[in-house]
């Protein structure tokens, strides 16, 4: 492999600048959560201001940002409708308790997203597994036996007609009024864009929102390279659909691109074919190659809305989700550096102080944290998109397990790639032991009260797998954890191989068994995580955002 000049430059710059950077929460179980009410706990979220100096941008660009924030506010309303129901402002105003009202706003409903969706408002009951995307009285069996051509469509609601029969209602029909206003805002923003390609993308995205045909705009977005301002907008992730994992929900993430850093990090995308050849699997599992236009970019977030603004906030994104677009163009990996920095300093370091063995605490640092997140995103572009045995795409074959397996693969394979490149002499500036211990601390944080989502469940599986192999070790006296450096790399390679082959085989039943056995948080680990709770360390971040924080009012 000939990586030395390019990758070494990236990592050297990383060590100097200390850049900060998956988001999809997908269904992982087919059970209704317990109905026991819990107390609202808004304090689990640390506030973080999404501020930025927009002085370097032109008047037109600042006006465009204001329009895109207005568009994001519509996205927020659409997500409320999909996850809970209409008139959220009226409902929130009816809640007397200040903590409950704030927590309801943070969760987009009366269910605690970081505590197994348990209700914190009396009488709310269990959250429907299908959210508001399916009729509340619909059973899984009724849906599976219904004659509904296109029933797995990502962009339609399931409703009942006057005779009580299940029907599909396309998003662009169900939300016609809101989407018309949203599309006009994107077109107005396009008129102000300084990048001609970005202007075209905004117009294509506006048309997509009105037709539910997103592939063309996704393909074009992968070719937009010169824009300093970008927006991820539309019904993208499927985690709100815990029945089948079919239906996308609306989100918006408005970002400012660091063009200089993005150019440096994009070097990694050029390495994907060579990294694919290094996968620890038989040859038939690495015959598919990602598109050559894949890239890696660094951003600061200035506005989150919809599903992007709920639960565990993304520090990195890998898009588009369309399998065919990924096969043609690869994927764009967005590292959200201000969100990453906020989480590391306010959450991960305090967690490490409580749970990481004193002899290894010095290994937890931001350079390692950024690196494991960076290679996690690179790993999303490796492996296979289609099964090797004719079962269709990995996403279709693994169904509701697809996101959990993919996140687990990216975690393990990202760490494996750090080892491969280090052994090739390409990461001299990066300490592998730092990465392994920081990954342990990050897994402990991710598991804490958030094990139900795709990323959380993937971390539980990985944590238990490494404990069973002796790679993660708990000291019984201190209750702290350390990495066994002699065993960790074999454990990483073994889990990466298993998950890559599971995807290639489209082995749904094996994925279910894996999460059933390894995806359980032990009583001992829960007790250890309680020590973190006693320190009142936040679980995630929430955003103070809007025009005022950007100086645009």
Image (spheres, grey):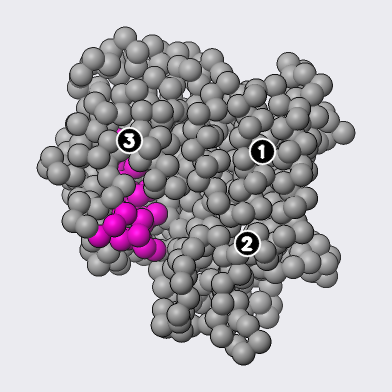
Identity of the residue furthest to the bottom in this view: 163
Mark 3 or mark 1: name the one nearer the start of the chain: 1
Q: Nearer the viewer, residue 478 or 302?
A: 302
Q: Where is residue 422 in the image (x, y as percent from the top left)?
A: 25, 22
Q: Nearer the viewer, residue 62 or 163?
A: 163
Q: Where is residue 12 in the image (x, y as percent from the top left)?
A: 40, 13
- Please tell me which residue lies in front, 311 or 198: 198
Whole-percent x and y of residue 82? 64, 64
Task: Point out the stretch of residues depicted in magenta.
Answer: 391-415
Tell me, yes or no, whether the two marked residues, 3 and 1, touch with CB atoms within 8 Å.
no
For disc 1, the marked residue is: 203
Q: Is mark 1 on a helix, strand or loop?
A: helix
How far is the residue under mark 3 from the one under mark 1? 27 Å
Tag 2 secondary structure? helix
Sequence order check: which comes first, mark 2 or mark 3? Answer: 2
Quadrant the C terminus occupies: top right
Instruction: Look at the image and tell me in which quarter the N terminus lies.
Output: top left
Q: Is residue 450 above or below residue 512?
A: above
Q: Say left or right for 110 vs 139.
A: right
């Amino acid at each position: 492999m000939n990586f030395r000049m390019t990758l070494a430059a990236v990592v050297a710059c990383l060590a100097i600048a200390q850049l900060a950077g998956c988001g999809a929460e997908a269904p992982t179980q087919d059970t209704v959560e317990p109905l026991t009410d819990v107390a609202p706990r808004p304090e689990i979220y640390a506030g973080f201001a999404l501020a930025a100096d927009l002085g370097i941008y032109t008047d037109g660009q600042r006006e465009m940002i204001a329009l895109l924030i207005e568009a994001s506010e519509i996205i927020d309303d659409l997500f409320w409708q999909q996850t809970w129901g209409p008139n959220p402002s009226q409902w929130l105003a009816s809640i007397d308790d200040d903590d409950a009202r704030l927590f309801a706003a943070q969760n987009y409903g009366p269910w605690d997203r970081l505590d197994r969706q348990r209700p914190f408002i009396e009488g709310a009951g269990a959250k429907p597994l299908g959210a508001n995307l399916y009729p509340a009285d619909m059973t899984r069996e009724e849906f599976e036996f219904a004659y509904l051509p296109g029933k797995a469509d990502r962009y339609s609601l399931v409703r009942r007609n006057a005779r009580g029969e299940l029907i599909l209602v396309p998003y662009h029909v169900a939300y016609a009024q809101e989407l018309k206003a949203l599309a006009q805002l994107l077109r107005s923003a396009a008129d102000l864009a300084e990048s001609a390609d970005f202007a075209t993308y905004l117009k294509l995205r506006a048309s997509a929102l009105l037709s539910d045909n997103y592939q063309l705009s996704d393909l074009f977005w992968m070719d937009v390279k010169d824009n300093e301002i970008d927006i991820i907008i539309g019904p993208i992730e499927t985690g709100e659909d815990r029945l089948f994992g079919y239906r996308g929900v609306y989100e918006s993430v408005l970002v400012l691109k660091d063009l200089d850093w993005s150019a440096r990090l994009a070097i990694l995308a050029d390495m994907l074919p060579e990294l694919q050849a290094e996968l620890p699997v038989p040859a038939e599992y690495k015959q598919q190659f990602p598109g050559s236009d894949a890239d890696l970019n660094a951003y600061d977030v200035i506005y989150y809305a919809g599903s992007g603004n709920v639960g565990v906030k993304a520090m990195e994104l890998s898009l588009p989700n369309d399998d065919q677009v990924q096969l043609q163009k690869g994927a764009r990996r967005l590292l959200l550096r201000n969100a990453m920095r906020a989480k590391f300093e306010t959450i991960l370091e305090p967690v490490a102080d409580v749970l990481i063995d004193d002899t290894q605490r010095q290994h937890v640092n931001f350079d390692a944290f950024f690196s494991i997140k960076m290679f996690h995103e690179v790993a999303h572009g490796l492996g296979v998109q289609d099964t090797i045995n004719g079962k269709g795409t990995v996403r279709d074959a693994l169904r509701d397990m697809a996101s959990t397996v993919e996140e687990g693969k990216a975690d393990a394979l990202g760490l494996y790639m750090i080892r491969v490149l280090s052994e090739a002499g390409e990461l001299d500036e990066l300490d592998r032991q730092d990465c392994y211990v920081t990954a342990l601390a990050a897994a402990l944080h991710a598991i804490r009260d958030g094990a139900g989502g795709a990323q959380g469940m993937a971390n539980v599986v990985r944590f238990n797998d490494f404990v069973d192999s002796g790679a993660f070790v708990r000291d019984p006296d201190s209750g702290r954890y350390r990495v066994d450096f002699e065993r960790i790399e074999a454990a990483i390679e073994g889990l990466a191989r298993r998950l890559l082959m599971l995807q290639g085989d489209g082995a749904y039943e094996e994925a279910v068994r894996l999460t059933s056995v390894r995806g359980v948080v032990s009583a001992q680990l829960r007790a250890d995580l309680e020590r973190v709770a006693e320190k009142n360390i936040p679980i995630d971040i929430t955003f103070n955002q809007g025009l005022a924080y950007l100086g645009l009012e």
